[in-house]
Amino acid sequence: MTDDHEEITETEESTAAETPAEPEEQVEPPSPEEVAATAHEFLTGLLEHLGVTGEVETRIEGETTHVDVTGEDLGALIGRRGQTLDALQEITRTAVQRRLRHRVRLLLDVEGYRARRREALADHARSMAERAKERGTEIEFEPMNAYERKIVHDAVGEVDGTESFSEGEEPYRKVIVRGL
């Protein structure tokens, strides 16, 4: 029995040694249109498999491909505080990157959730910045993802006499707004 085991091990080792590693190819970056088409195809198929009816539309802004899903009763795709939407975006981005073998910038929105959240968050950040400035104190925001932290930093940057910074470790990283 030992001889058989050794023989199998030798065969596995020799097969592994004979199989060449995949060459690292220089892959041309995909065009924004390729990214959009691939994301559209993937997300349409995913929605179909999930049994969700929704319309998938893509648009390109700079180097970022925006994918919008519209339809009825899509709250399950957004989830609590956008957590399901964040996961869906990550799955879509990963699938597109693997298929195109290149890093891509992709932003997914469902029923305009991110647009509404962005506006509400920016308004809240400006309001808290004004409050911090009036009181000369710091105001700590709840933990949020990098995308939302950037919205807060940008909005606070519009308010003279204030500054913002992030502290903590993911997923508990948060923004602190300080009045100067």
Image (cartoon, rainbow, N blue to C red):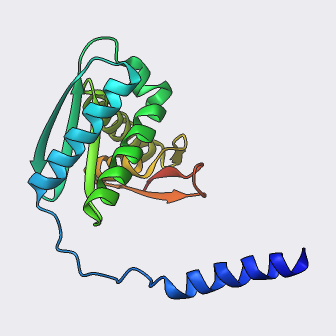
Residue sitting at x 76%, y 81%: 7
Give residue 132's position: percent from left, percent from top.
45, 44
Give the side of residue 40 with respect to residue 32, left or right: right
Q: Say above or below: 112 vs 161.
A: above
Query: Image check: 142 left or right of 87?
Result: right
Image quadrant holding the C terminus, namely: bottom left
Q: Residue at x 34, y 82 (%)?
A: 24
Image location (x, y in percent) of residue 170: 57, 54
Residue 65 is left or right of residue 91, and the answer is: left
Whole-percent x and y of residue 158? 25, 50
Q: Give the residue at the far right of this rendering.
A: 1
In this rendering, the answer to whether 92 lies above or below 9 is above
Question: Where does residue 29 sit, x and y in percent of width and height?
Answer: 18, 69
Does residue 11 show up? Answer: yes
Rendered-image quadrant of the N terminus: bottom right
Q: Residue at x 23, y 44 (%)?
A: 39
Q: Name the residue furthest top.
A: 72
Nearer to me, 77 or 5 = 5
